Amino acid sequence: MGKPLIALPIFPARAFRHSCIFVNGRSGIREPRDLMGKKVALAEFQQTATVWVRGTLQHEYGVDLEKIHWFTWAKTRMEIEMPRRYQVTQIPFDKAPDEMLATRELDAMICANLFPSMLNGRPEIQRLFENYPEVEAAYFKKTGIFPIMHTVAMREDLWKESPWIAVSLFKAFQRAKTEAYARLNDLSPYRISLVWFREPVKQQKEILGDDPWPYGLAKNRHAVETLMGYLYEQGLAPKKLAVEELFAPNTLEL
């Protein structure tokens, strides 16, 4: 986007997104390929969560993204030139996309954050992957990817003036993460406001290992390269960049 920013290989937000695909139960959508020819809503076409979902649908399930009629409901936070090969329609701002899904004005939707109606339960609305924990675990075992949503960046002029800040920030985030893991792994029943938490923590460790939120380029190269590939394929990046071009040079070996 031409912004004077430089990234640091710190990834504080990640999420599997199979659980984010909802369908109307009367839409006839039973598997991912059934999305083709349907009306599918998402907040923003360029939102990281939807980039991951589309890439996963295309590469893991053979979905042709150009055969979906896309609808967006959010006000665009960053203007981009949309690829002409996609059919994208803006939903009027006075209409609620979850209600449109319930009444089948939409067939499906991808939402990074759940609507209250979904939390309260709507019989018309179902997840495409009802067994999403198993599906997401299988996806990780196959690909090794825990999808990155956000990274940390700093102004490029500040980095050039004081490159040591990038390394110090990396170390600070690393230490904070280590302390967070320690609290999570503490056997005391009073550190976390959850009644039953040890079994989920154990399951997470069995699937994702001891460091499910790894920092540093080496541990994240495959995930970053995959995301960059999706951005290019979906027409949101004009060219494929080498991942080294994205990050502060003095953080590449951290």
Image: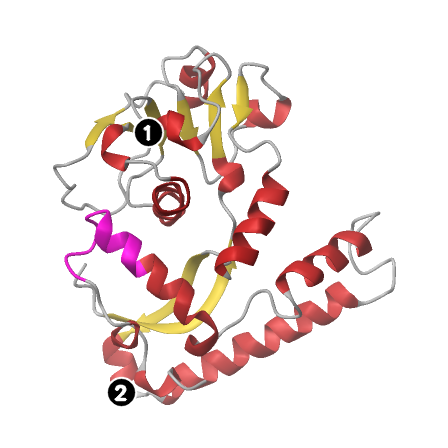
Residue 214 or residue 158, whichever sits in front:
214
Q: Position of residue 231 (x, y in %)?
A: 27, 53
Indicate left or right for 153 with 81 as reference: right
The span shown in magenta is 228-239
Query: What secondary structure is marked by label 1?
Result: loop
Q: CB atoms at circles 2 and 1 under 8 Å apart?
A: no
Q: Position of residue 81 (x, y in %)?
A: 13, 44
Quarter where residue 96 is shown:
top left
Which residue lies at the image location 24% right of the left edge and 47% below the top edge?
A: 234
Give the alpha-carbon distance from disc 2 to disc 1, as whole Å. 41 Å
Which residue is disc 1 drawn over?
Answer: 73
In the displayed structure, 149 sits above or below 184; it is above
Q: Secondary structure at mark 2?
A: helix
| Type of the residue with mark 1 | Trp
Pick the residue in front: 59 or 73.
Answer: 59
User: Is 106 displayed left or right of 10 in the figure?
Assistant: left
Which residue lies at the image location 51% right of the left edge and 62% below the top edge?
144
Q: Which residue is mark 2?
A: 161
